[in-house]
Amino acid sequence: MLLTIPDVLTAAEVAEVRQILDSAEWVDGKITAGYQAQSVKENVQLPEGHPAAAKAGEIVLAALARSPLFMSAALPLRVFPPMFNRYTGCGHFGTHVDTAIRAMASTGQRIRTDVSATLFLTPPDQYEGGELLVEDTYGVHSIKLHAGHMVLYPATSLHRVTPVTGGARVSSFFWIQSMIRLDGDRTLLYDLDTAIQRLARELPGNPVGVQLTGVYHNLLRRWAEM
């Protein structure tokens, strides 16, 4: 499932995060790329554990915690500490698949990367190129969102970032280990949850809503990994 989540960060939060990032020192993005990805990655990012990354990451994590749409779609068990990158001067990231298991620099704890996330921090009219292209069975999807908006997509997807030929593209990226390992199962639960919420709005008190809620939680109970 590929899903756009609007307004994860408010305009004030985007400005605060950008202020934190703009005063930090960036390093070559290859330091966190896997063997295959190193040959196709041309950007800069903040090192894991950098004080600026930690401070900005706290803002992002707090925003995720208050987003019902994120919770419903990702069903997060663990969230990798948000990281931050910047593309300028034809910087790009060629076609790749995200590493399946990542260790947190601060604790060494490993997470399985079920869901990938990109949170845009630059308005789209301030840079040229820089589209995130995600491939799935329905083709290639081009994503370039407003600042503060985020996209979720399966970490198993082939994806790339096209060259930034003007301006600078700044974003946060991270991964989620979901309670539901398989994307198809997460999609089914998300669709069911969305239908339940719509039913509650349009037909409040309808007993069908209670029955469907039971189905949702019984499927979650059957599939969830803790």
Image: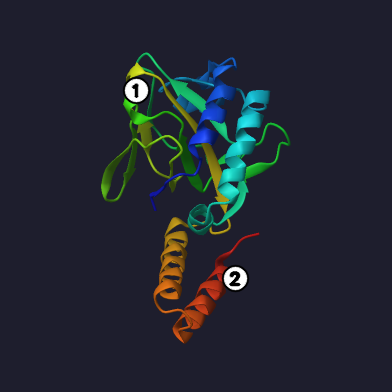
Residue 146: x and y in percent read: 38, 36
Circle on res. 221: 2
Tell me if residue 142 can be seen.
yes
Pick the residue in front: 52 or 106: 52
Up the image or down, 19 lies above or below 186; here it is above
**Taking 131 as reference, is 102 left or right?**
right
Residue furthest out toward the left = 139
Q: Quadrant of residue 184?
A: bottom left
Up the image or down, 59 lies above or below 153; here it is above
Q: Residue at x 48, y 36 (%)?
A: 11
Q: Earlier in the sequence, mark 2 or mark 1?
A: 1
Residue 61: x and y in percent read: 61, 42
Residue 165: x and y in percent read: 31, 17
Pick the residue in front: 7 or 139: 7
Which amino acid is tagged 1?
Answer: Tyr
Which amino acid is tagged 2?
Answer: Arg
Q: Quadrant of residue 149?
A: top left
Residue 191: x and y in percent read: 41, 65
Q: Which residue is mark 1?
A: 127
Pick the residue in front: 47 or 67: 67
Up the image or down, 20 lies above or below 151; here it is above
Helix, strand or loop at label 1? It is strand
The C terminus sits in image quarter: bottom right
Q: Residue at x 33, y 31 (%)?
A: 131
Measured Cα–Cα span from mark 2 to mark 1: 45 Å
